[in-house]
Image (spheres, rainbow, N blue to C red):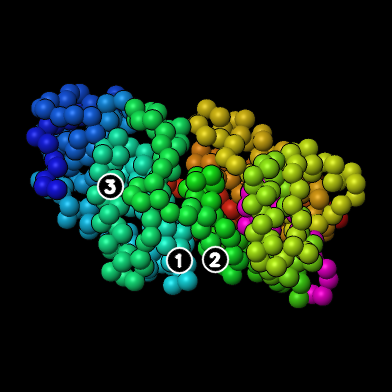
Amino acid sequence: MGNLTKEAMATLKKGEGRALKAGGPWIYDNEIASLTGSFENGDIILVQDFDGYPMGAGFISLSSKIRIRMLTRSKAPVIDEGFFHSRLKAAWEYRKTVLPPSDLSCCRIIFGEADFLPGLVVDKYADVLVAECLSFGMDRLKEQILADLKSILLEDGFPIRGIYERSDAPVRKKEGLLPFKGFMGPAFDTDVEIMENGVRYMVDVVNGQKTGFFLDQKHNRLAMQRIVSGLRSTGSPVRVLDCFTHMGTFALNCALAGADEVTGLDISDFAIAQAKENARRNGLGDRVRFLKANVLDELPALYEAGERYDVVILDPPAFAKAREATKNAAKGYREINQKGLRLIRDGGFLATCSCSHFMTRELFAQVISQAAASAHRRLKQVEYRTQSPDHPFLWTAEESFYLKFFIFQVLDIP
């Protein structure tokens, strides 16, 4: 792999590229005045300002409104095998620095633009890598890059037995790419057992959500272990309701911490089956039950039946997947939090989160406050948390910051 930078140039319009100049990773189609030179879709081309000032190089995508995804700000960029090797090495060294050694068995190794590898996501589940490729240019280079990543991990004592690609997100269509799922190299058993926070899970990397498992909530699940353990130390029984339980992750963390009774709710048959198997795998089946239910319907039914809980966890899917959906998403978050708050005993705890980039921390906090007022409950904030550090967010790439996670003590209004 020699220097991949083409002798082609994107020139910005005068007054455009403000986000780019502030450190942002993308250039939109309407910011470009001209494209000159010879190149193909997905090539790496040079970028200059309207006055000819060099601004670096990046992948060009002729099908996407994100026309260029920047790779470097170098004035004379050499983008070759060594360039990508250094980026991969830096991403892995970062994880080794910010995560405890036990977390390296399952973690996100590459997080796209936040690791300066635009359009590439790689998760590690024990000795398996799962890759997601979301940009045209990265799609062309993924095999060489992932082979290099395997070598880096092997040198550090982490052999990888196989790679599976989960590039089946609909957003690929915006890049002119078709959804794809399949092995990258020889086939292997895609049911992979991992351990996180002392809990064992069987991850189905072919059929699971995203790349198979939500690694971003790792430390938030551990925070709920601490809450439940603290409640249990008082000697009172602890009841937990985990809404949108998916694979039972929060539910099992709470049970492991000593909760006496944990109920997990999810509308998916596949998720409920996985959650039950994970409970069995951890010997927690006697304290955890999983029910197929529409959470929005089930919460009022539980309230009317007189059910009350010491801990309620709300981890819904993203209600806002586009900016124009934010208003309706706020309504949905308000409704789900109001219903959840009514089920919590005086002095109990609410854990509530949003995984939508467009639902800002400020808006999400406002929505929760409105829900508390409507439910006639007071909230005492315990913690505000975000995604785990293997999902770093780059301050100049706001789209890399998406997870907002609050823990509150819930009190009656006297």
Tag 3's secondary structure? helix
Instruction: Tell how many labels.
Output: 3
Distance, label 2 to label 1, CA atoms, is 8 Å
Please name whichever residue, 384 or 308, is drawn nearer the observer in this view of the structure.
Answer: 308
Q: Residue at x 45, y 37 (%)?
A: 168
Q: Looking at the image, which is closer to me, 387 or 6?
A: 6
Q: Amino acid at mark 1?
A: Ser
Task: Check the image and report above or below for 215 versus 303.
Answer: below
Against 12, residue 118 (above or below) is: below
The residue identified by callout 3 is 143
> Which amino acid, by three-letter code, is at mark 3?
Glu
Q: Which residue is mark 1?
A: 105
Q: Do callouts 2 and 1 mark residues in contact (Cβ within 8 Å)?
A: yes
> Is residue 143 on the magenta stretch?
no
Q: Counting other residues with Cα less than 10 Å from the Cα at mark 3, is it few (<14), some (14-19), or many (20 or more)? A: few
Residue under label 2, please give it: 195
Residue 305, x across and y down, in percent: 90, 46
Q: Is residue 36 left or right of residue 400?
A: left
Query: Where residue 198 sits in the image (x, y, percent)?
Result: 59, 70
Indicate left or right for 190 with 35 as reference.
right
Query: How far apart are labels 1 and 3 at the CA level?
Result: 22 Å
Identify the element where label 2 is drawn.
Answer: strand
Q: Mark 1 falls on what kind of element?
A: helix
Q: Give how far apart the Cα atoms at labels 2 and 3 are.
A: 28 Å
Label 2 amino acid?
Met
Residues in magenta? 234-253
